[in-house]
Image (cartoon, rainbow, N blue to C red):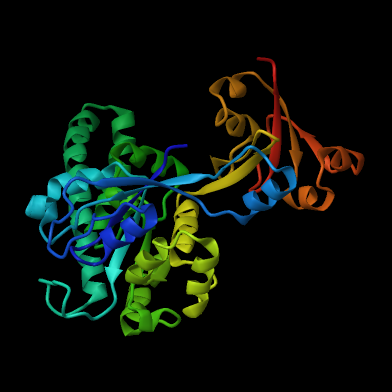
């Protein structure tokens, strides 16, 4: 399932440093504005200890993680919606992603260029969101103009869509993001055709220094307060430290480095899992001696949809699914013992797959 998270933010907030650490792509960061023009793209594994535990039991030929694609989008500036700082191209790149990771600078460092004045994470957040909102309003105004003519001519579908678009337009004009509007599923379906930028799910990464690894500083507290009304997640990460961690290839050495800073895991692992969740994704597993693999599906997906991730024909020819819960697999450690204990269930087309299910599909193909 090819879903993308776009990393955005003002110039020199640590986006490219974070992206480099995420993907181990070196030399993508530079200490000047618009160092990133064309978006960098990297696919990263989703850390999942369950996959490793299953592999210990089965000892397969290979292990395949679920993945998330990250896109490092060039730094936006005030006026981007009008083309400032190559803004139109950058906003187009944002339109192509499924969710947004907004990196906000929450540290002091006189050696890192900042043309926007004193450090102010709330102002930085507002600058980015305003540009996205302005672009969305342009999109809405353009579509509303076309619909008004059809609605006046008596087109009932146009009247319905017009009412929805006007509702979103009024909401965004109040300085609010489209995703925060309380709307029906039908209204959301109608507006989805416009691919509004502020409709995309967003999480905030507060880029801090090493002194703020374990406790919010004043900048982070201000950022959390500013996004509390939309119940947005704020993740505290030190991008500079993560870049150092990413260079360590030996697992034992990496664990020692983390312990030295009082960390149980890297901030990047938290970010990847949070991005996975932000996209509304979950994982099921297939287990065999050739391969233990994590498959990515949308939360709420039914068994035939999950089967389609393996092969599109599996959905069309789906008969049933054999399902084992992850905890049962760990306890009994073999499918024979699992069956004898009555812990393997047989599910039909209406079964809603749960995160961590171990599945085997039977098809007529």
Q: Position of residue 9 (x, y in %)?
A: 24, 61
* Vertical arrangement, residue 162 with respect to residue 73, above or below: above
- Residue lying at 29% horizontally and 62% vertically, measured from the top left: 17
Q: How many marks?
A: 0
Q: Is residue 98 left or right of residue 150?
A: right
22 left or right of 125? right
Q: What percent of the width, then of the height, locates residue 169?
A: 25, 51
Residue situated in front as seen by the camera: 25 or 210: 25
**Relative to 233, is 222 on the left or the right?**
left
Residue 287's spot in the image, x, y percent?
A: 69, 38
Image point (20%, 78%), residue name: 119
Residue 58 vertical position relative to residue 134 in the rendered view, above or below: above
Residue 80 appears anywhere in the view: yes
Residue at the limit of the structure toward the right, as seen here: 340
- Residue 257 at x, y percent in the picture: 48, 73
Above or below 159: residue 34: below
Residue 238 position by quadrant? bottom left
Looking at the picture, tell me which residue is in the foreground, 364 or 40: 40
Rendered position, 132 above or below 194: below
Residue in view at x 80 percent, y 50 percent: 328
For the question of whether residue 201 can be seen, the reply is: no
- Which quadrant of the figure contains the C terminus? top right
Q: Is residue 284 left or right of residue 173?
A: right
Image quarter of residue 152: top left
């Amino acid at each position: 399932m090819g879903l993308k998270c776009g990393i955005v933010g003002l110039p020199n907030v640590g986006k490219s440093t974070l992206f480099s650490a995420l993907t181990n792509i070196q030399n993508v960061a530079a200490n000047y504005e618009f160092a990133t023009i064309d978006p960098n793209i990297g696919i990263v594994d989703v850390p999942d200890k369950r996959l490793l535990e299953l592999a210990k039991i089965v000892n397969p030929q290979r292990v395949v993680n679920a993945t998330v694609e990250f896109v490092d989008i060039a730094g936006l500036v005030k006026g981007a919606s009008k083309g400032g700082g190559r803004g139109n191209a950058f906003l187009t790149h944002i339109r192509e992603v499924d969710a947004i990771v907004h990196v906000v600078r929450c540290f002091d460092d006189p050696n890192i260029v900042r043309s926007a004045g004193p450090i102010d994470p709330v102002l930085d957040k507002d600058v980015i969101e305003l540009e996205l909102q302005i672009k969305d309003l342009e999109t809405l105004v353009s579509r509303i103009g076309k619909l008004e003519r059809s609605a006046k001519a008596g087109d009932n579908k146009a009247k319905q869509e017009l009412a929805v678009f006007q509702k979103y337009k009024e909401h965004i004009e109040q300085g609010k993001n489209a995703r925060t509007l309380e709307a029906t599923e039908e209204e959301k379906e109608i507006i989805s055709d416009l691919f509004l930028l502020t409709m995309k799910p967003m999480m905030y990464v507060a880029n801090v220094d090493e002194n703020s690894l374990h406790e919010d500083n004043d900048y982070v507290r201000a950022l959390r307060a500013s996004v509390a009304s939309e119940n947005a997640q704020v993740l505290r990460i030190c991008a500079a430290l993560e870049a150092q961690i990413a260079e360590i290839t030996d697992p034992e050495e990496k664990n020692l480095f983390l312990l030295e800073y009082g960390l149980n895991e890297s901030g990047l692992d938290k970010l990847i899992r949070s991005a996975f969740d932000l996209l509304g994704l979950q994982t099921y597993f297939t287990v065999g001696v050739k391969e233990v693999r994590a498959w990515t599906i949308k939360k709420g997906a039914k068994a035939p949809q999950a089967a389609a991730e393996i092969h599109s024909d599996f959905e069309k020819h789906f008969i049933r699914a054999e399902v084992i819960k992850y905890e049962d697999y760990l306890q009994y450690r073999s499918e024979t013992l699992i069956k004898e204990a009555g812990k393997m269930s047989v599910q039909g087309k209406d079964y809603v797959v749960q995160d961590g299910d171990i599945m085997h599909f039977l098809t007529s193909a």
